[in-house]
Image: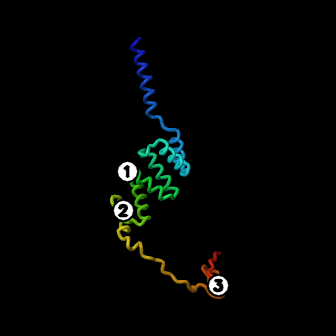
Amino acid sequence: MIRSFLVSLLFAFSTAVIAQEVKVSPQFSKAKFAFEAKQYKAASIGLSNYIAGKYDASNVQAITMLADCFWNMRAYNQAKFCYDKLAQTGASLTATEKFRVSELYAMSGNYKEAQALLAGLPQYKAKMLGYQKAADLLIDSLDYTVQYLNVNTNSSKEFSPSIVNNSFYWVSN
């Protein structure tokens, strides 16, 4: 009798402990659901509040999801901040995350850092080689002139672009 009582008490206690360990914040669950539904704005708000509210700045999953939200919303400065925070936690970046961080470095003109991140990723070898030749990227390629085209005549102006009375017109049929 006592033995069965102790076993049932141990079972109830262990169930309660396990239930407390896997308890997930409702705020995090809601943000994760929005993230999975590709509602990045709502997810970013929920994740930001979760991280700030719980003072859990080391939650790798939340930081990764927040960085992905900002990347998908094209909020690149915030994404860079999150990826930097993710690196500070010591988490290893996936190939996609390394690519994104390298793109963020390249956007800010730091091609050496961008190249270094892509060095170990064979699928991005061409991009890495492009970053090695950063001087070529910085040359102005906008060498153009505005003039009448051979296809535009006085009797036929249906081709785009056209210059009429010193104005530039784009025509589509």
Identify residue for label 3: 164
**Image mark count:** 3
Give the numbered dot on residue 88: 1
* Mark closer to the chain start, 3 or 1: 1
For mark 3, does the 10 Å Cα neighbourhood hold few (<14), some (14 to 19), or many (20 or more) residues?
A: few
Identify residue for label 2: 113
- Disc 3 is placed on an element classified as strand
Extreme residue toward the top, this view:
1
Q: In the image, what residue occupies the spot 52% across and 56% down?
A: 73
Where does the image place residue 123, in percent across and percent down from the top left? Answer: 38, 60
User: How far is disc 2 from disc 1 in space, using C-alphas?
Assistant: 16 Å
Q: Say which quadrant the N terminus sits in.
A: top left
Amino acid beneath label 3: Val
Residue 95 lies left or right of residue 47; in this view the side is left
Amino acid beneath label 2: Glu
Q: Say which quadrant the C terminus sits in.
A: bottom right
Task: Tell which of 170 and 111 is nearer to you.
Answer: 111
User: How far is disc 3 from disc 2 in space, using C-alphas?
Assistant: 49 Å
Where does the image place residue 104, in percent across and percent down from the top left? Answer: 43, 61
Give the numbered dot on residue 61: none
* Mark closer to the chain start, 2 or 1: 1
- Disc 1 is placed on an element classified as helix
Extreme residue toward the bottom, this view:
154
